[in-house]
Image: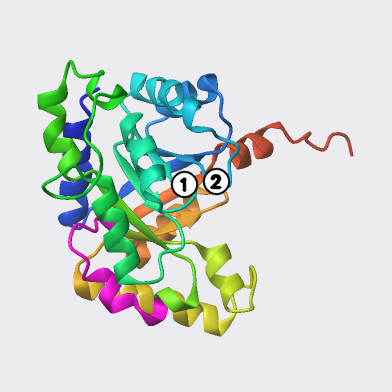
């Protein structure tokens, strides 16, 4: 697939106020990736924070996703420069960065994701440029891969305006479990304080014209459409393992 065109398409739709729907992968299996890649998502993020995924597995997972025309992304374990380089050199079209709490932290990750002159990421032959064969063609993609910041702590809410002002930010994504946990309200998604924090993030993001995202954990089309109607634009729909669990659970039979 042409990853640069896919990045441009997602970025263009988000900037126009349209939505982009992707999903998560936690099971590091190429057959799962091939199925996910042909499931109709704009992107699929391989989860290196909570999934048992190693850097050497990324190229094969990305190849399987790309077969279906789905942009491979990575949720980084951390925002360290090494994490950014390994994910992008393996062929990720962008990164989702967990636990962003300050603008400075996000700017450092952005720079670590970009080749000079836009950033500080090391330049070299890798799978992303077919080990030098497409070196020149990859230059543009390497200047600005997709950048999504996860907001998962009360400190991120406190620093939200400056985070949203970071140049190059494509979207923010609320992590509901970690955000609620940081408030002492783990998974209490109906608590007024948690709902207030969610509303503040969405309101400020809309005002700054930064697409706001949410993770719809349960595979529910009704919940997905509800979030879109509320104004969320970058949506992660469930997780491969969650969908698999739901599909294979033994049904009740008999009276």
Q: Residue 135 appears at what percent x and percent y?
A: 15, 24
Q: Which residue is mark 1?
A: 237
Q: Residue 40 appears at what percent x and percent y?
A: 37, 32
Q: Hey, which quadrant is residue 178 in on the image?
A: bottom right
Q: Which residue is mark 2?
A: 219
Q: CA distance from mark 2 to mark 1?
A: 7 Å
Give the farthest residue toward the right. 255
Q: Is residue 37 above or below residue 175?
A: above
Asked if residue 2 lies left or right of residue 100, the reply is: left
Q: Residue 111 appears at what percent x and percent y?
A: 24, 53
Q: Residue at x 23, y 29 (%)?
A: 124
Give whichever of 24, 28 is nearer the camera. Answer: 28
Quadrant position of the C terminus in the picture: top right
The magenta region covers 157-171
Give whichever of 81, 3 is nearer the camera. Answer: 81
Indicate yes or no whether the magenta region holds residue 140.
no
Q: Is residue 237 above or below residue 61?
A: below
């Amino acid at each position: 697939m042409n990853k640069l065109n896919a990045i441009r398409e997602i970025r263009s739709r988000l900037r126009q106020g349209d939505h982009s729907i992707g999903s998560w992968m936690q099971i590091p299996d190429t057959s799962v990736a091939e199925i996910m890649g042909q499931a109709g998502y704009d992107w699929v993020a391989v989860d290196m924070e909570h999934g048992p995924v190693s850097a050497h597995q990324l190229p094969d997972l990305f190849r399987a996703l790309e077969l279906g025309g789905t942009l491979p992304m990575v949720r980084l374990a951390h925002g360290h420069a090494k994490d950014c380089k390994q994910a992008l050199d393996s062929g990720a079209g962008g990164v989702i960065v967990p636990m962003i709490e300050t603008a400075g932290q996000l700017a450092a990750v952005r720079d670590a994701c970009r080749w000079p002159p836009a950033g500080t990421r090391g330049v070299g032959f890798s799978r992303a440029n077919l080990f030098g064969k497409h070196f020149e063609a990859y230059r543009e993609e390497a200047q600005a891969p997709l950048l999504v910041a996860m907001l998962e702590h009360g400190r991120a809410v406190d620093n939200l305006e400056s985070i949203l002002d970071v140049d190059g930010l494509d979207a923010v994504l609320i992590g509901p479990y970690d955000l609620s946990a940081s408030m002492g309200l783990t998974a209490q998604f109906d608590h007024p304080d948690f709902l207030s924090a969610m509303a503040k993030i969405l309101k400020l993001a809309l005002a700054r014209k930064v697409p706001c995202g949410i993770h719809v954990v349960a595979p529910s089309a009704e919940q997905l459409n509800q979030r879109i109607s509320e104004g969320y634009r970058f949506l992660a729909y469930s997780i491969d393992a969650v969908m698999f669990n739901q599909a294979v659970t033994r049904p009740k039979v008999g009276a």
